[in-house]
Image (spheres, grey):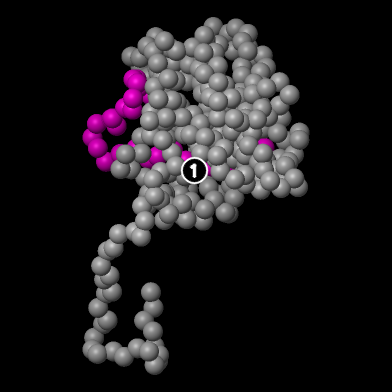
Amino acid sequence: MWEPLASPLVRKLTDGEMPPLVLPSRPPLAELPSIFDPADLEMSVIALSELRLEGRGLGTPGLDDATAWVEAQFAEIGLQPAGDGGFRQSWSWTGGEPARPMILTNLVGRLPGSDPSLAGQPVVVLAHLDHLGRGWPDVRAGNEGMVHPGADDNASGVAVLLELARAMKVEPPRPRPVLFAVVTAEEAGRLGSRRLLEGLKSAGAPLACVNLDTVGRLADGKLLVFNADSAREWRFLFMGVGHTIGTTIEIVTEPLDSSDQVSCIEAGVPGCSSPPGPTRTTTGPPTPPIGSTARA
């Protein structure tokens, strides 16, 4: 703020500093209900972090069941399959501990845009479905062999992706199509998102990627935005979002190279990731979300 000088509309009544301007707070003119359903979000997290899924480890029946559940949600929402083979994009891979051949599967649904000239430049919303199972490829000492349900990492991100798809499906289409991609093998080196971007680039690069990874611990903390330097627009977009919804958003300058937006950046597509910041000021570990244990 700058003090106005030589304005006929201003008259100073004191020779000292102008007192700070303090305006009374006032309620908003309207408080609209949320377009997102907290119950749907919670039920999605619960469904994907059930103990019977045993942590959605690669090559396990639990991950197969979780993939089938998300596929059914795509169909129920009314997303269009992004490929000729339906929502599934599968390929074979050998790995794990012990190493063995397995089928990996991404799920990709599409909301068409209204502008045909932008059909080849979608915005991609990502979330990874796999987790650590019973501790591979990463486990904390003492948790070997335990089920890691992955309620936060990353049932929470998949839940937000599904709820966002539900909300956007009933709204008028955007000019540009939106791809909702639930990818696999993030924990094993972003295999699913790398595979996805290879396929998308062959048809024309997406405009941008937004990655939802470990978003279930916001509470009173900040929403952190990683890799916002991958496009100059990101910073200003998230500043606007923060002012609109009243959530503190912090642009993190340190790069995050372990989540799926990095696969987008490696492919030349601007990508960012928006996990919440943990409450690091507490002396104990953060409260785990629904269904989580060990490394959530």
Q: Nearer the viewer, residue 190 or 61?
A: 61
Asked if 23 appears above or below 245 in the picture, the reply is below
Instruction: Please tell me how crowded label 1 is: few (under 14), some (14-19), or many (20+) other residues with Cα within 10 Å.
Output: many
Residue where numbered disc 1 is placed: 226
Tell me what residue is drawn at x 67 percent, y 17 percent: 91
Asked if 161 appears above or below 33 in the picture, the reply is above
Horizontal placement of 159 versus 191: left or right? left
Horizontal and vertical percent position of residue 237: 52, 53
Secondary structure type for disc 1: loop
Horizontal and vertical percent position of residue 76: 55, 25
Q: Quadrant of residue 36?
A: top left
Horizontal and vertical percent position of residue 23: 27, 70
Horizontal and vertical percent position of residue 127: 53, 31
Residue 270 within the magenta-colored segment of the rendering: yes
Residue 23 within the magenta-colored segment of the rendering: no
Asked whether the viewer can see residue 5, the reply is yes
Q: Quadrant of the N terminus?
A: bottom left
Q: Quadrant of residue 21?
A: bottom left
Q: Amino acid at mark 1?
A: Phe
Q: Quadrant of the C terminus?
A: top left
Horizontal placement of 242 versus 17: left or right? right
Horizontal placement of 238 versus 293: left or right? right
Tell me what residue is drawn at x 59 percent, y 30 percent: 78
Q: Nearer the viewer, residue 148 or 240?
A: 240
Q: Quadrant of residue 215?
A: top left
State the extent of the magenta-drawn residues as a range: 267-296
Tell me what residue is drawn at x 76 percent, y 33 percent: 202
